[in-house]
Image (spheres, coloured by chain):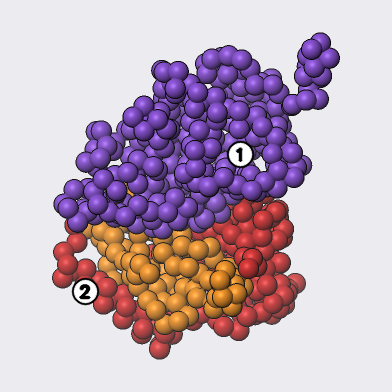
Amino acid sequence: MVSEAHQRRIFLKSALAVISSLIVPSVGYSRWDKNAYNKTEIVASVQSVGVTNLADLREGGGKITLLTPKIAENGAIVPITVNSKIPNTERIFIFAEKNPQPLVSDYVFTPHVEPFVASRIKMSETAFVHAIVLAEGVFYRTAREVKVTIGGCGEDS
Amino acid sequence: MRLLFYLAALGILISQAPARGSPEEDRQMFLDTYSKNLPDVPLSRYVHGSMMLSDDALSQYDSIMDFPPFQDAVDSGEKIWNTPFKNGQNFSNCFENKGVEIAGKFPYYDSDLEQVVTFEMALNFCLQNNNEAPVDFVDPETMGALSAYARSLSDGMLMQIEISTPDALAKYNDGKSLYFRRIGQYNLACASCHLTHGGHYFRDELLSPAIGQAVHFPVFRGGERLYTLQMRYQRCMEAVGAVPYSSGSEELNNLEFFHSYLNNGLPLESSVYRR
Amino acid sequence: MDKTVRFRVRVKDNIANVKAMIFHPMETGYRRDKNSKSIIPQHFVHTAIVALNGKTIMEVHWSRSVSKNPYLNIRVPGVSAGDEISISWLDNMGQSGSGVSAIS
């Protein structure tokens, strides 16, 4: 059990980490990239995270495991898992190609955490989900199509 | 008379005539229909309803249920359940065994009140008997959340509805007759889809059998929109173009009584994900 | 709105399988209020910091394309009893929260 005082210290340290990381970018980190997250088309979206030349995107092949459903039960909550076996993975970017803004999320890894992440995303319609891995300055990609019958962005009134 | 018999047999009058049998004979008739529609599917899978034939759907279900996004709603129900009334009593005092492992006996026929009592009604009776205001059957933040938590205290318990008097049987039969009655602009009965075609595909959706349905409520559709069983009946009635009965009405209570009896023997699990 | 983070942590061979959930609407800005019909504004967690014993080990960037009540599952190797994993988050309206879980 964590004592209250101890919990406060942890909270403050984390909160400070959040605040300070927003003021002074640490080496290898990148702040939430407004420019990238506002792109409305997949090619521009992929380029905006640093893939200046799409031809430089390497196929991840068996080294990136991307797990997605074949047919999403509900586009509002699509479970996905990405695991990178590429050494020195620094970033994982996730895109849902047909979402209004295709860049869904990105993760910054230090050597203290495995390059693995599972989360739940919203998909507006049937599309490819792309996982792009950045390791030692090289971008790798894998993708899987997910069929969506009930769209997840909630255009209901 | 013979013409009527032939017409009935051809299914022209009604899609499936309600059997003139006992509740157990009814349940067996439902089971027989489903084993024809779903050969090789064990009964234990029926609780997954329209997901039961899709490993892809079930894997999403398992993933979401591992850490449900509606946990906060269930937690708020836990808070309601645990908060004492103004008179110092609380919900657990109203139920046998403090509310643990009891939901499988609901609905039951109350011979004093001469009506079917559902679990949600019992929650409201508890409030009223303790001088608190009853809550709205269709409000997700009060009855929904409370029911989501309170029912979960009976997770794993087998549905075990008892019909042991002629008066109880009469209510069961009222519920059964609604189940088989064609209603709405589409002129469909519950039985049209969920008995005759339970386990068959309707466009790309698998129609869930009646057996397996009543044990897994309330549901959180899309992981967030709460529906009690009677709210679900209401949505179905609207779907066939009928004006729905109210949650807590005699009609839906009797329907739930009949429907729950069919589900006898299956384990309860409340607060689950549905698409 | 709940400002804390809910954790479920399981350790095997010193690797912590961390599952966490932040209870946040992750509002896309596309939905309309049922009564007033006006657009419900965007409201989503954009950044979360994962720390081990106070030291940042991972940074999470999300958008409104992440599901409501966002879920995060990560794996932290080399943990021992007494270690603390914390998650602090910040949303686009300047609201924040955090939670901590101790490895047993």
Is residue B130 visible in the rendered image? The answer is: yes
Q: Nearer the viewer, residue C26 or C5?
A: C26
Chain letter of disc 1 in the image: B
The residue lying furthest to the top in this view is B2
For the residue labelled by badge 2, is the local secondary structure a helix, a strand or a loop?
Answer: helix
Q: Nearer the viewer, residue B126 or B81?
A: B126
Residue to which mark 2 is pinned: A9
Q: CA distance from mark 1 to mark 2?
A: 46 Å
Is residue B149 visible in the rendered image? The answer is: no
Disc 2 crowd rating (10 Å Cα; few below 14, some 14-19, many 20+) is: few
Q: Nearer the viewer, residue B8 or C3?
A: B8
Which numbered marker is on residue B51?
A: 1
Please give the name of the residue rendered at 27% of the width and 76% of the height, measured from the top-left corner.
Answer: A13
Chain B: colour as depicted = purple
The residue lying furthest to the bottom in this view is A23
Please give the name of the residue rendered at 36% of the width and 33% of the height, measured from the top-left corner.
Answer: B113
Q: Position of residue A157 (x, y in %)?
A: 63, 68
Chain for colour red: A
Chain C: colour as depicted = orange
Chain letter of disc 2 in the image: A
Q: Label 1 sits on what residue type?
A: Met
* Residue A129 found in image quarter: bottom right
